[in-house]
Image (cartoon, rainbow, N blue to C red):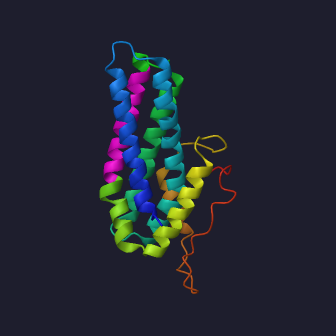
Amino acid sequence: MDDISSLILADHAWFREQFAQLDELRALASPNRDALERVWRPLADKLDVHAYVEEKIFYPQLLKRGADDPEGETLDAIGDHNEIRDGVRAADAASLGSTKWWDAVDRTREANDDHMGEEEREGLSDFRRHAPIGLREALGEQYSEFMARHPTTKGLHIVDRDPQAYVYRFEATRAPRPADHSLGIGSLKGESNRPG
């Protein structure tokens, strides 16, 4: 069974491949709009869904289990997610293949590249070192199930979040580890349409 950190890393590799495909299309004298759409639409959707599910299950657990600087890592990540979402929205508002569209795609890529690098060096590393494998695998199962149910953003409330308010919400509700030695991670059932 994959743990959540390996699944997040696999998504990161996929993102890099999709942006490389866009590079190939951009190099053509006249990129085909259908080809751009075939790469961009799944990429844009997965960027949003990936950030959404990380904010639902990974970062709350990093705040509980991380030891290096989980608050700082989470604040940075939520801010990065906002920049990525903003880039996706800007690209979606522009004419596909236009200079404005490419500029928005480039901003999205830059924000995502920065985020992935920081997350791989900091949050994921911290979590792997301080969270038990059973928790990582249980979260991986939730992550996989959520991503399978949501190949697009349909039904998800995709919004920018206030990083400080996000951290405060989870810090304020942090409870001690369950006495029954369960992982205390809950479920994502019913989460897909809830704002927050």
Q: Is residue 54 magenta?
A: no
Frontmost residue, 160 versus 172:
160
Q: Quadrant of residue 155?
A: top right
The correct choice, above or below, for 183 with respect to 3 in the image is below
Which residue in the rendered view is the most extreme toward the bottom? 179
Q: Quadrant of residue 153?
A: top right
Q: Position of residue 131 (x, y in %)?
A: 42, 73
Q: Residue at x 54, y 84 (%)?
A: 181
- In the rendered image, the residue lying farthest to the top is 30
- Horizontally, residue 125 falls left or right of residue 90, namely left
- Which of these two is toward me, 71 or 6? 6
Does residue 113 belong to the magenta stretch?
A: yes
Residue 106 picture location, percent across and down:
36, 30
Please provide percent x and percent y for residue 193.
68, 49
Image position of 193 with respect to 43: above or below? below
Q: Is residue 168 shown to the viewer in this render?
A: no
What residue is shown at x 47% (from left), y 54% (from top)?
Answer: 164
What is the span of residues highlighted in magenta in the rendered image? Answer: 101-118
Give the residue drawn at x 38%, y 13%. 30
- In the image, is residue 33 above or below residue 127? above
Total tally of numbered discs in the picture: 0
Q: Nearer the viewer, residue 128 or 65?
A: 128
Q: Quadrant of residue 172?
A: bottom right
Q: Is residue 156 left or right of residue 176?
A: right
Give the residue displayed 34% in from the left and 66% down from the top: 126
Could you say where residue 27 lies in the image, as x and y percent from the top left?
31, 20
Decide if residue 77 is in sight here. Answer: yes
